[in-house]
Amino acid sequence: MTRAAPVVGCAACGKAIDCCEFCDRPDCPTAICYHCLGVALSQATPELHDHGG
Amino acid sequence: MGFTQVYDYVAGKLDWLAAGGPIEGTSAGRPRAGEVARGDVPTCGLDERLGEVQARVRAAGWDACVVVNQERVVLGLLRAKELAGDPASRIEAAMRPGPSTFRPHVPIAEMAHRMVDHDLENAPITTSDGRLVGLLRRTDALRTAHEPHQAEGDST
């Protein structure tokens, strides 16, 4: 099985990807790769306590 | 310290959060995707026909359906575009396979912001092992993100 050629670049890191990891669209103007999306979502998640416990 | 029963959750706190486990703490009052996602979203299996599913989904007042297996692991998604396909086609052929899914602990404000940016109507929320928690609708995400909530006034 052949894989489609990458058509977009991640808006955060520039990596070539098949489609946006958030919306699955190959023509997404704000496409984001799996890695950058994971980092962004994890940074947006606050610790439960100030001390990180 | 007086604890008589102590457990070590080996998979770690993030895995607990991603599985939608109950949480406590100063940030626990912030709304998250898993609380806002609609667990009553219609579901269907791979072997059904699109026509049957279309009727069921419309009768329930939805415009989306999540394709799951017997363990409720998400296999695909039927949004409005896919639901408008040939009624005779099998779900496996009609669905959008392997959609991006998100964990229940992601803050609702982050999801709402990204769903607007990406013009995404809905997003499946699953546990880290892929089981359906519910479908997060953009309208619900935006409404909840803009509501005042418990943690907003916290100094943490």
Image (cartoon, coloured by chain):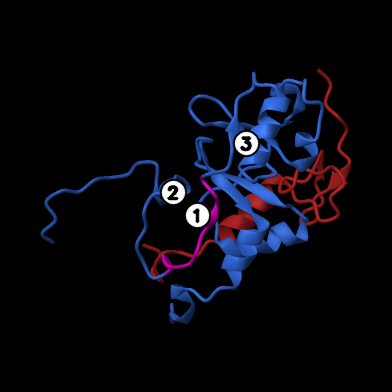
Chain colours: A red, B blue
Quarter of the image with the C terminus of chain B is bottom left
Residue identified by numbered label 3: B66
Q: Quadrant of residue B150?
A: bottom left
The numbered mark at residue B20 is 2
Disc 2 or 3, which lies upstream in sequence?
A: 2
Q: Chain of mark 3?
A: B
Quick check: B11 above or below B92? below
Q: Position of residue B141 (x, y in %)?
A: 61, 61
Classify mark 1: helix, strand or loop.
loop
Front label number (3 vs 1): 3
Q: Which residue type does callout 1 highlight?
A: His
> Which portion, as a residue range, is magenta?
B27-39
Does residue B3 lie above or below A4 as drawn? Answer: below
State the residue position of label 1.
B105
Estimate how packed mark 3 is, as few (under 14), some (14 to 19) or many (20 or more) residues with alpha carbons within 10 Å.
Answer: many
Residue B51: % across, % down: 72, 26
Marked residue nearer the N-terminal end (2 or 1) = 2
Label 2 with label 1: CB-CB less than 8 Å: yes
Secondary element at image label 2: loop
Provide residue A11's location: percent of width, then percent of height. 80, 56
Between B127 and A34, the one nearer to me in the picture:
B127
Can you see residue B98?
no
